[in-house]
Amino acid sequence: MTARTPLATKAIDGHRIPPHAVLLLSPYVLQRHPVFWEDPEGFNPDRWTPERAAGRPRFAHFPFGGGPRRCIGQNLAMLEMLVILAMMAQAYELRPVPGHPVEPEALMTLCPRDGVLMTPHARRCVR
């Protein structure tokens, strides 16, 4: 959840929000809303292509928050993820362990309940 508190009366989609009200934003719910996402529960990296993302509201996806309180480490986190993914993909093929489904658990952030169990298989060095 992300919380925001307006300092003055605001209206959102015709609803009056008084000053100091606590607004809770759920990335989990918003990022699976069928109005914004085709097959919202499916894994589809193509949803991030410029053609597919065109017209989607800016904050339909906000893993690092937004505005002046956006996570200061966003750019570093994205860079680290790309480097680690590239290094892992070169060296290993990861296969899910049979019989261990991935189930979400809502804690401070959304995490896999029992982790994601994978078996690494070394890739052959091709020269």
Image (cartoon, rainbow, N blue to C red):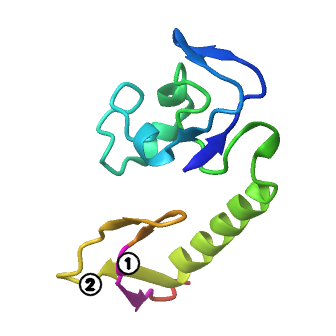
Identify the residue under disc 1.
Answer: 116
Coordinates of residue 57 in the picture (x, y in percent): 56, 24
Magenta part of the protein: which range? 113-123
Q: Residue 88: where, in percent of width, then height?
A: 55, 79
Mark 1 or mark 2, which is nearer the start of the sequence? Answer: 2
- The kind of residue tagged 2 is Val
Nearer to us of marks 2 and 1 is 1
Give the vertical position of 75 relative to 29 (above or below): below
Which residue shows up at 52% across the image and 8% down it? 14
Q: Is residue 95 left or right of residue 24?
A: left
Q: Is residue 53 above or below residue 118?
A: above
Q: Which residue is pictured at 60% across the width and 43% down the height?
A: 62
The local crowd at label 1, few if under 14, some if 14 to 19, many if 20 or more residues have their Cα within 10 Å, is some
> What residue appears at the point 55 percent right and 41 percent down from the top-left corner?
24
Question: Where is residue 91 drawn, in percent x and y?
Answer: 53, 84
- Mark 2 neighbour density, 10 Å: few (under 14) some (14–19) many (20 or more): few
In the displayed structure image, the side of residue 43 where residue 89 appears, left or right: right
- Residue 115 part of the magenta segment: yes
Q: Position of residue 94 (x, y in %)?
A: 39, 80
